[in-house]
Amino acid sequence: MIRIGIVGTSSISERLADAVRAVDGVALGPVASRDGDRAREFADRIGAPGAVRGLDALLSAGEVDAVYLASPNAAHAQQVEAAVDAGVAVLVEKPATLAAAEWDGLVARAREQRVVLLEAMRTAYDPGIRSIAEILPRLGRVRRVSFRYEKRSARYDHVLAGEQTNIFDPSLGGSALRDLGVYPLHALVLLFGEPRRISGARVGIASGTDGLGSAIAEYDDLVADVAWSKITDTALPSEIQGEEASLSVDAIDAPRRLVLTPHGGASEVIDVEAPENPMIGEVERLRDAVRGADIASDQDRTASTLRLVDVLLQRPLR
Ligand SMILES: NC(=O)c1ccc[n+]([C@@H]2O[C@H](COP(=O)([O-])OP(=O)(O)OC[C@H]3O[C@@H](n4cnc5c(N)ncnc54)[C@H](OP(=O)(O)O)[C@@H]3O)[C@@H](O)[C@H]2O)c1
């Protein structure tokens, strides 16, 4: 049984705990929080076997085989390093690091020490993305891709009220691009590879980070536009246009309803069967990696996505 300790006590950790309970071969390990009481309260709530104060205590207690790191983005790299050095497998929330070079260094370290290091990019392990990959040949030559993830966050109201909140706090790596933009970018890399070139623009908000943005990614024979936002909503689907057919995708982070429309033909609706909890796939992948599955290509996709984020972050905020 692979024991997974949880670091961070927000709602996403609760969701991960629920996924752990749904996957064979893994079990919840102790919870770590910066605050001992919060760790205990959270462990009781999710049914975890113990609680400790701080990651170091978790790593030195010898009660976990893996850790799930769900802290603010700026804390990821240091926590990954500590876990890797302790020989404990890591599932780290997206974006795995603030910059691609940081990720490359951690992957090299993990490979050297033969420790599993995987980004918790749920989209990569989603049945909906697998369905899209299977349908792609029916589209003919793909010429345009239009992926978006735009959802106004309730926490934006705090920014509007003049308060700082982690997810929009640049000192913690908060950013709409890092929070939501990485999903369509990762899906793009997974389905079409890393683009030759990317450029874009981001719109800044009062907290000092980006609230939304758009990018154009260039390939040899297709172009992709990618949109993300945490301050506005969209009613538009994502889409892949091929010369033979186009495919509309309800949500590129977790595709559940696909509509295939052949050139000059009638549309076909394809519903994707998927577990209710979209984090199950990443827990299964972590388990398989600990059992020896090769995750080099998963790590490379994370690197590609982070390289695109690096470029998009270079442009000053508007
Ligand atoms: N996969 C998904 O669908 C999904 C959804 C949401 C978020 N995420 C990712 O999950 C991560 C956490 O996001 P979140 O919105 O849950 O963040 P958050 O609420 O700001 O922080 C998560 C946890 O980290 C700890 N923490 C808070 N501030 C910290 C700091 N300055 N240094 C170290 N630890 C700190 C807190 O736990 P303690 O106080 O108990 O230590 C907190 O519960 C991010 O990387 C985000 O991108 C993923």
Image: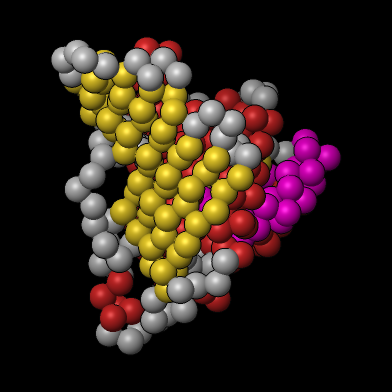
Q: Residue at position x 67%, y 52% from top?
A: 100
Q: Residue at position x 46%, y 58% from top?
A: 177
Q: Which residue lies furthest to the right in this view?
A: 112
Q: Which residue lies furthest to the bottom in this view?
A: 162
In the rendered image of this protein, does residue 10 appear above or below residue 148?
below
Q: Is residue 106 magenta?
A: yes
Q: In which quarter of the image is the N terminus?
A: top right
Q: What colouring does the structure picture have?
A: secondary structure
- The image quarter in which residue 276 lies: top left
Relative side of 22 to 113, left or right: left
Q: Which of 20 and 309 is in front in this view?
A: 309
Q: Nearer the viewer, residue 165 or 258?
A: 258
Q: Where is residue 23 drawn, in percent x and y?
A: 42, 29
- The image quarter in which residue 300 lies: top right
Magenta span covers which residues?
A: 87-114
Q: Residue at position x 78%, y 38% from top?
A: 111
Q: Does the magenta stretch include residue 18?
A: no
Residue 147 visible within the image: yes
Q: Which of 38 and 133 is in front in this view?
A: 133
Q: Where is residue 280 drawn, in percent x and y?
A: 40, 33
Relative side of 86 to 273, left or right: right
In the rendered image of this protein, does residue 221 appear above or below residue 90?
above
Q: Residue at position x 33%, y 79% from top?
A: 159
Relative side of 88 to 152, left or right: right
Residue 54 visible within the image: no
In the rendered image of this protein, does residue 211 appear above or below residue 225?
below
Q: Where is residue 113 drawn, in percent x and y?
A: 81, 41
Q: Count the marks: how many?
A: 0
